[in-house]
Amino acid sequence: MKIKNFLKATIHESLLTGILLAIVGGFLDIYTYLLKGNVFANAQTGNMVLMGLKIAEQNYLGALYYLLPISAFFLGIVISEYIKHRLSNVQYVEWQHLILIIEIIILTIIAFIPKEIPYSVCNVTIGLVCSLQVNTFRTTNGLPYASTMCTGNLRSAGQKLSAYLFAHDKDALHHCFRYLIIIFFFIIGAIIATGLINIFGQCALLFCCILLLITLLILVY
């Protein structure tokens, strides 16, 4: 049983899993920015800054517009922790798999949601998806990382490179490259999103569903 659990943990933390999720992360950020009112679904720092700007301008309704995805992101963290708490000791259900299934269902619905629906509805739900993902998949081969934002990954890459240059830690160089690979594919996700949105519009979001389904199959089998 310990060996089986170890193998499952290894798959969850594999570089391939990290790459697939990073592509999804970059895709979602561009998706909401281009199609849903210039809102960042993943990194809430940008939304907090824009909310502060709206408050300073005494545009409180505009501030609320940015508060909604921030709140959804926070709620997603709580939901993922609840699912983890409820299913961690269940033998036949992996809580990470359930998170991926929830992501796929939500994003599929958003891909076909009528365009008349307010942007805030989509931004809130995508913000929820991003927080579910980033709080569920936190490490890649033992290294802490984020699949839906890159600032922390960039800092970690810089730290690892410094450890290699100044402390001659050879493992740190490999770790640095791992972070750079995650960042690279996050950017690739943004590039892919831009191209697919120009062709398929809102339905381009189904690309993320395909990647998440592939990730789920990798984890299950």
Image (cartoon, rainbow, N blue to C red):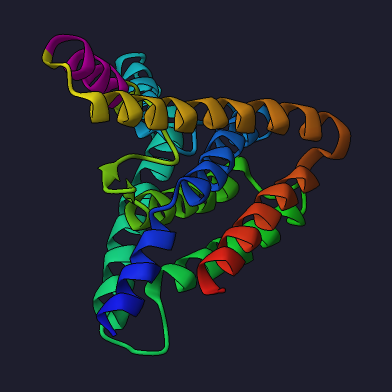
Farthest residue toward the right? Answer: 199
Q: Is residue 196 visible?
A: yes
206 is within the stretch colored magenta: no
**Viewer-proximal residue among 157 and 107:** 157
Question: Residue 73, relative to residue 157: is it above or below?
Answer: below
> x%, y% of residue 117?
69, 50
Side of 85 where 132 appears, left or right: right
- Residue occupying the point 43% across, 52% down: 14
Residue 166 percent across, percent down from the top left: 14, 10
Vertical arrangement, residue 141 with respect to residue 175, above or below: below
Quadrant assignment, res 137? bottom left
- Residue lying at 47% horizontally and 73% vertically, measured from the top left: 98
Between 99 and 168, the one nearer to me in the picture: 168
Q: Position of residue 86 (x, y in %)?
A: 28, 81
Residue lying at the far top in this picture: please name it: 166
Q: Nearer the viewer, residue 134 or 125?
A: 134
Can you say which quadrant of the picture contains the N terminus?
bottom left
Quarter occupied by the C terminus: bottom right
Residue 124 placement (x, y as % from top left): 49, 49
Q: In percent of the image, x 62 and y 33: which residue is there? A: 189
| Magenta stretch: dominant secondary structure | helix
Residue at left offset 26%, top offset 85%: 89
Residue 218 lies left or right of residue 208; in this view the side is left
Q: Which residues are magenta?
A: 155-166
Q: Outermost residue, left direction?
A: 167
Residue 48 appearing in the image? no
The front one of 136 and 168 is 168
Q: How many marks?
A: 0
